[in-house]
Image (cartoon, helix red, strand yellow):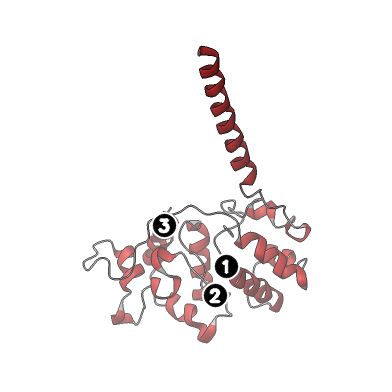
Amino acid sequence: MMMKTSFYVLSVLAGLTIVNIVQVNAAEPQQAIPPAAQLCTSCHGAQGQGIDIIGPRLAGLSAEYITNQLKLFHAGKRQNPTMLAMAATVQGDNIGLVAQYFSQQPVADISLQFRGDKVAISDPSERLAFQGDWSRTIPACTSCHGPSAIGGGNFPRLAGQQASYIKTQLLAWQDGTRTGDVDNMMGNIARKLTAAEIDGLSQYFANIK
């Protein structure tokens, strides 16, 4: 009886072990980096998580958005000496391959906050993000960038993005060195923001993790 019981227990344990192995092997393997994206990883990281100051996070951005930004660099509507050279190496079908690869890289799950979840917001950056300032015709950032600014389509994810990058881009919209969006919407909004508001929004969105 003892031998039968031991054999049964061992069989169950072996079965569980096999199930665990199968589950691990069935897990989605890490996606191979396309050759066209190899150069991008030197600044943006192998999984597009970004390297602070050097390159922003690409993971979490849509393929549509990444594709459009590469084309804007090609057209000279976005100005950055490093990216102008790097973007020039990604042409034709490789644009889609690079965009798809980085858009499919993982980002942390976050608890979503929607517009209207809070009526009274004391933090000025959070208030701008979710309520805007209609006295200056500034819409809420989440009107376009989605709940907790997770982005979608041609609106980039701001949640968890580097504060230094968000600030740099808002300043670029302000001084006109970044263009290309419909009706210069971001340029019009950025020009109405104060230096303190740009700093506050950059830190606020970067801390949504």
Q: Earlier in the sequence, mark 1 or mark 3?
A: 1
Question: Which amino acid type is shown beneath numbered disc 3?
Answer: Gln
> How far across and down, in percent of the image, does residue 131 sit?
31, 72
Relative to residue 206, is residue 61 drawn left or right?
right
User: Of discs 2 and 3, which sits in the foreground?
Assistant: 2
Cα–Cα gap, marks 2 and 3: 22 Å
Residue positioned most to the top: 2
Q: Nearer the viewer, residue 137 or 1?
A: 1
Q: Nearer the viewer, residue 204 or 48?
A: 48
Determine which residue is flagged by label 1: 62
> How far across and down, in percent of the image, does residue 119 sit?
22, 68
Circle 1 crowding by C-alpha within 10 Å: few under 14, some 14–19, many from 20? many
Q: Are marks 2 and 1 in contact (CB under 8 Å)?
A: yes
Residue positioned most to the left: 120
Question: Which amino acid type is shown beneath numbered disc 2?
Answer: Asn
Q: Earlier in the sequence, mark 2 or mark 3?
A: 2
Q: Residue at x 61, y 60 (%)?
A: 104
Q: Residue at x 78, y 66 (%)?
A: 89
Task: Quadrant for residue 99, please give it.
Answer: bottom right
In the picture, the disc for residue 203 is 3
Circle 3 crowding by C-alpha within 10 Å: few under 14, some 14–19, many from 20? some
- Mark 3, secondary structure of its residue: helix
